[in-house]
Image (tube, helix red, strand yellow):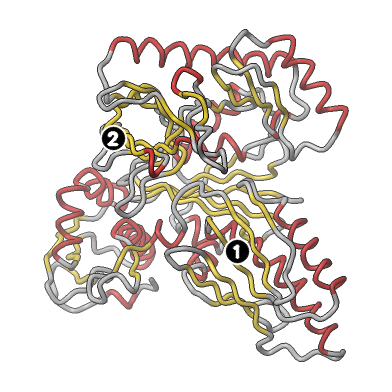
């Protein structure tokens, strides 16, 4: 499989795209205005303990208290004996009291008005290893199928393991030397000891381990010797990747490339067009059939429709053909859109159980490409497949759009950061055609204020990078997802003279 990585740093966000065999397979958006918390470890304070909910609320220094289910408490010192009075024997009594200090790790980002979800089972991810403190466990990624390689890695892990510090060897550890594995393990132990010292010195709530920002975290997981091309348009990110490759002793040859053209990288590589399609509910298949992807509060629903497909066989055979094609595309769309939680897929009805089995197996096969954890059930007699997908961050829809105030959140418009990226693209294209270096930029007052006050440094960089003087003007008539340009010497709108 031909794998390529494209990294573009804009005014308000960094975008990372992965192409597999020339087709967009993964997309990540790292906003400067949004702090990533998954993987962070905090020394928190217990605010409330609610046995009826089987959960506690922990103050970790954020606006909303974090949510700690009792099922996420694995420290024996915090768990009393299981409540034998309950017939289902699933409820647990915990030894937590309001005001008590506790170390927790974020496993799900805060979303909407809900706080982060946390656990007491700490894990610190490295390049090849995930360190699991207070554990004897040694594991190897289930995605690694070579039994001899699994055996070799487990042997290395057994030899280097320290008491009370378990580990899981990641998929990228495949083929790595003893020295590379041991070096990664040693670095993780240093990080763990550092966070313990920080915890001892500071009062709660306190961040004691800051995991990598989205860009570095994604690159840590994606970059390997199997990548044929890594294209970066930022000099800082280019140097960062060079350092990462050197530290991990990766042999990527001349795959790393610094993109210097004026045309935006994502526009030049065709990724922008593919990215905008992800905001639509409808996804077309090559056969003429299509998917409708709807996201609700409780779940994601995918409906498979025959559309323009004209089959030459009987209904059962045609349905099987569409469903097989749909299974491949659904797996790709879930991965691209970062959809998670409970997912229901309504395939076209098939009478024969063996055909439903074929579609189920195709779905399972395609989902193996996904780095997120998934669980899939077989297709019911009603043609519905139920599955769950791990939430690893915000969906693409939430990453590059925001709620529309006009319709009170029922619709979406592109976010302020994504609008700033489009303005940057416009200015780059403008520079190719015109030499007038003084422009007026008209924006909705809320967006204008965001650029001038919250993004002052980016505002200056925008002018400096494009060598243009930019006067931002508040315009009440502009929508939050619009911008308009005129020359300084004229009020004539020149926005449409450049493609956006």
How packed mark 1 is, by other alpha carbons closer than 10 Å (few <14, some 14-19, many 20 or more), is some
- Where 260 falls versus 303 (above or below)? above
Q: Which label number is shown at residue 48?
A: 2
Give the spatial CA distance, label 2 vs label 1.
39 Å
Which of the two residues, 345 or 10, is positioned nearer the viewer here? 345
- Where 79 falls versus 389 (above or below)? above
Q: Secondary structure at mark 1?
A: helix
Rendered location of residue 46, percent (x, y): 30, 29
* Residue identifier under label 1: 333
Does residue 117 appear in the picture of this structure? Answer: yes
Residue displayed at 13% across by 71% down: 475
Rendered location of residue 157, percent (x, y): 72, 16
Residue displayed at 59% across by 75% down: 283
Asked whether the beta carbons under mark 2 and mark 1 sit within 8 Å of each other, the answer is: no
Residue displayed at 50% across by 38% down: 91
299 on left or right of 438: right
Rendered location of residue 340, percent (x, y): 53, 56
Q: In the image, which is nearer the foreground, mark 2 or mark 1?
A: 2
Residue displayed at 74% across by 9% down: 159
């Amino acid at each position: 499989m031909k794998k390529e990585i494209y990294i573009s740093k804009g005014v308000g966000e960094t975008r990372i795209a992965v192409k597999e065999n020339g087709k967009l397979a993964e997309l990540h958006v790292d906003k400067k205005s949004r702090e990533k918390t998954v993987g962070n470890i905090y020394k928190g304070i217990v605010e409330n303990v609610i046995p009826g909910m089987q959960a506690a609320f922990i103050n970790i220094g954020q606006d909303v208290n974090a949510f700690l289910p009792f099922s996420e408490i694995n420290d024996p010192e915090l768990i009393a004996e299981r409540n034998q009075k309950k017939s289902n024997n699933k409820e647990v009594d915990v030894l937590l009291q309001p005001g008590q200090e506790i170390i927790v790790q974020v496993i799900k980002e805060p979303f909407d008005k809900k706080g982060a979800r946390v656990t007491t089972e700490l894990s610190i991810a490295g390049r090849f290893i995930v360190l699991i403190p207070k554990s004897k466990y040694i594991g190897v990624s289930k995605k690694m199928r070579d039994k001899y390689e699994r055996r070799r890695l487990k042997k290395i892990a057994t030899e280097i393991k320290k008491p009370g510090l378990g580990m899981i060897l990641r998929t990228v550890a495949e083929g790595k030397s003893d020295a590379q594995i041991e070096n990664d393990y040693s670095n993780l132990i240093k990080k763990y000891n550092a966070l313990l010292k920080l915890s001892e010195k500071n009062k709660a709530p306190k961040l004691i381990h800051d995991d990598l920002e989205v860009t570095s975290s994604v690159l840590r997981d994606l970059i390997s010797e199997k990548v044929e091309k890594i294209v970066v348009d930022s000099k800082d990110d280019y140097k960062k990747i060079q350092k990462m490759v050197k530290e991990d002793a990766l042999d990527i040859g001349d795959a790393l490339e610094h993109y210097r053209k004026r045309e935006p990288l994502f526009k030049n590589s065709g990724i922008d067009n593919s990215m905008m399609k992800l905001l639509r509910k409808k996804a077309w298949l090559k056969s003429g059939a299509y998917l409708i992807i709807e996201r609700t509060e409780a779940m994601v629903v995918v409906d498979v429709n025959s559309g323009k497909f004209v089959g030459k066989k009987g209904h059962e055979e045609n349905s099987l053909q569409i469903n097989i094609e749909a299974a491949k595309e659904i797996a790709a769309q879930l991965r691209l859109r970062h959809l998670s939680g409970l997912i229901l897929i309504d395939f076209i009805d098939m009478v024969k159980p063996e055909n439903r089995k074929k579609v189920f197996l195709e779905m399972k096969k395609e989902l193996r490409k996904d780095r997120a954890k998934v669980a899939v059930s077989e297709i019911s007699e009603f043609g519905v497949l139920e599955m769950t997908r791990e939430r690893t961050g915000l969906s693409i829809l939430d990453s590059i759009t925001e709620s529309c105030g006009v319709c009170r959140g029922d619709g979406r418009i592109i976010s302020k950061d994504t609008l700033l990226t489009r303005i940057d693209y416009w200015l780059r294209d403008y520079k190719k055609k015109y030499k007038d270096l003084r422009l007026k930029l008209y924006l909705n007052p809320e967006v204008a204020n965001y650029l001038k006050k919250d993004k002052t440094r980016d505002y200056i960089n925008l002018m400096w990078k494009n060598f243009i003087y930019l006067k931002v003007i508040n315009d009440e008539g502009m929508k939050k997802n619009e911008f308009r340009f005129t020359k300084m010497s004229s009020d004539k709108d020149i926005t449409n003279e450049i493609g956006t």
